Amino acid sequence: MRAPLGIRVLQTLRKEPDWLAMPAEDLDAFRTAENRRRSAPLIRVVTGFPARGVTIHWHQLPLPGRSLRIRVYRPATDDAERALPLVLHVHGGGFVGTAVQSDWINSHLAARLPAVVVSVEHRLAAAGVPFEAAVDDGWDALRHVLDHPAALGVDPARAAVFGESAGGLVAALAAIRARDAGLALRAQVLVNPCVDLTETALDYPSMTEHADSPTLTVPQLRLFRRLAVPEGADARAVSPLYAGSLAGLPPALVVVPTLDPVADQGRAYTRRLREQGTPAQLTEHAGAPHAFLSMPGVVPHARAARAEITGFLHGRLT
């Protein structure tokens, strides 16, 4: 099955760099340019237009030793004094990406649930910055917002985590840390999640079948893994699939596009959640590519996934 026409057109317009041979300074320049492109008004033709009636603003979280930027979405028509459920979102990309690329899904979730959606502008994997930093950012943001609920008008008793791609890894680990800390989350949503950064990460059949997919390739995954887990680091510590226990976690919705190298990782994580007694619902979108939820303008499947996610969270947060 082929990717949607819009994705194939975009693919022909972009040249795939030699990821593994790219010097650190070139990768830094690429990241800056790519994130600027993903934040440009014109790209909304691809990434989707925000929901009307939702305020979107940047906010700084004061954390020990650092400040962390988050993007906050809240229904503008809602009573400002009313505490709303919290959805903590983590964008995809791993070594590239910005919360702005997810304005469409996050603003629509805020409007339709309704809820306060907080998207974490986490540190990206780079030379000298392992992905453990992003994992810490996700958990620290969740903990800070729930410890100071009045600051953003959230109800700490109604919270969920939601991540896409590498952000799914951060969200899954945040759910595990929350359980271990005695923090009760209501739900977790993982969209095309990458949950295995160990030596087995590239061994799944979907990696071979979709190695050159239009929106994610195996060379990109090799680069991400090299940056995310530098030599000597413990890959299992940032691989939810290999967590010691997945019991007692909040119910999960795992959304898997079928034209995706990491599709089998999402399927494997769903199986392990179920084996450990955690309720897990798997939905698959035939013909959709990786990162499709961030491209509603060219991938029609994104709207069906949005409806699934909204319904799943509404049933657990309201």
Image (cartoon, grey):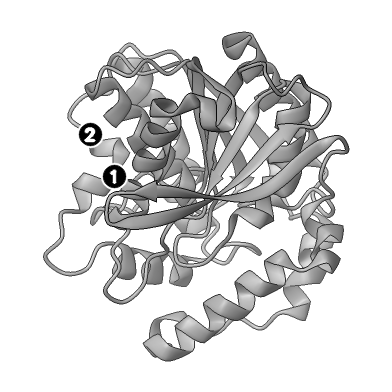
Q: Is residue 133 visible?
A: yes
Residue 185: x and y, percent?
42, 18
Q: Is residue 289 something that shows in the picture?
A: no
Residue 25: image quadrant is: bottom left
- In the picture shown, does residue 74 fall above or below 37? above
Q: Height in image: 208 above or below 222? A: above
**Residue 148 percent coordinates (x, y):** 43, 29
SS label for mark 1: loop
The residue sitting at 84% across, 26% down in the picture is 77
Looking at the picture, tell me which residue is in the foreground, 281 or 233.
233
Q: Is residue 134 left or right of residue 206?
A: left
Mark 2 highlights which residue?
243
Location of mark 1 (residue): 239
CB under 8 Å between discs 1 and 2: yes
Local crowd size for mark 2, using a 10 Å CA cut-off: few (<14), some (14–19), many (≥20): few
Secondary element under disc 2, as helix, strand or loop, is: loop
Q: Residue furthest left?
A: 232
Using the image as rendered, state which of residue 123 and residue 274 is in the foreground: 123
Q: Is residue 301 left or right of residue 96?
A: right
Q: What distance separates the C-alpha of mark 1 from that of mark 2?
A: 7 Å
> What x and y, as percent, mark residue 193?
48, 43
Quadrant of the drawing holding the C terminus = top right
Please state which amino acid type lies under the numbered disc 1: Ser
Picture coordinates of residue 170, whole percent (x, y): 40, 43
